Image (spheres, rainbow, N blue to C red):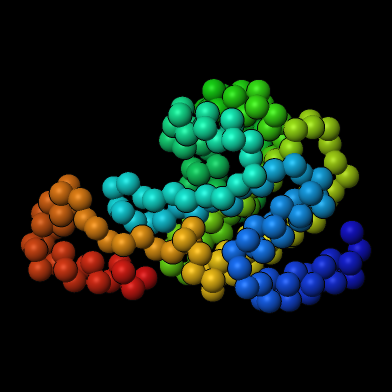
Amino acid sequence: MQDTDFFSWRRTMLLRFQRMEAAEEVYHEIEFQAQQLEYDYYSLCVRHPVPFTRPKVAFYTNYPEAWVSYYQAKNFLAIDPVLNPENFSQGHLMWNDDLFSEAQPLWEAARAHGLRRGVTQYLMLPNRALGFLSFSRSSAREIPILSDELQLKMQLLVRESLMALMRLNDEIVMTPEMNFSKREKENFEMDGGREDISRDSDDFVNL
């Protein structure tokens, strides 16, 4: 892609996301951009920093329902390498055998459900939540899109889509209420007493 083409696309995207008035517009645009990059599916996932012992994970996707149900039933979230800090800290992840070397059951199941190639872009939100935008497709063939172009576009898409959803107060990006479990309360008490629990709670709510 020519530099002029990319910057023209970038200006268009920035204006489009700024003018969106509903979350459905955001998801529709992500799906359209995925298709423009020759991908069939997308997933926008947000992992919140709270509750501390069981962080909330929310997502929106056009994956086949059969795959979403299977993924959840097998608790693949626990072994998904895309959500491993050692991996996502790189920012841009191409799905391949190396990435899934320690999660072969997940990789094999994904391909069996038609997800043969994919890529994920990571972003940290102002509220410390972690955002993950993934594109995937059924075809295993290579596509003539430069890696740099794909990375730059996904960086913009994950950032602008999540910022738009925050502006629209969409549930997927909103920080969960701080309802402490018994275990969490006990942990805080061990660290400094009940008074610290109240103070720390306020601090975290305001992140």
Rendering quarter of residue 154:
bottom right
Please indicate, yes or no, whether residue 148 appears anywhere in the rendered image: no
Left or right, 170 with respect to 191, comes to: right
Rendering quarter of residue 64:
top right
The percent position of residue 207, horizontal first and vertical second, equals 37, 70
Please indicate, yes or no, whether residue 162 appears anywhere in the rendered image: yes
The percent position of residue 104, horizontal first and vertical second, equals 56, 24
The residue lying at 62 percent from left, 73 percent from top is 21
User: For this rendering, which residue is in front, 50 or 31?
Assistant: 31
Left or right, 93 with respect to 144, comes to: left
Quarter placement of the N terminus: bottom right
Q: Is residue 37 above or below residue 107?
A: below
The residue lying at 27 percent from left, 71 percent from top is 203
Q: Is residue 113 above or below residue 177?
A: above
The percent position of residue 91, horizontal first and vertical second, equals 60, 53
The percent position of residue 108, horizontal first and vertical second, equals 61, 23
The residue lying at 80 percent from left, 56 percent from top is 149
Rendering quarter of residue 3:
bottom right
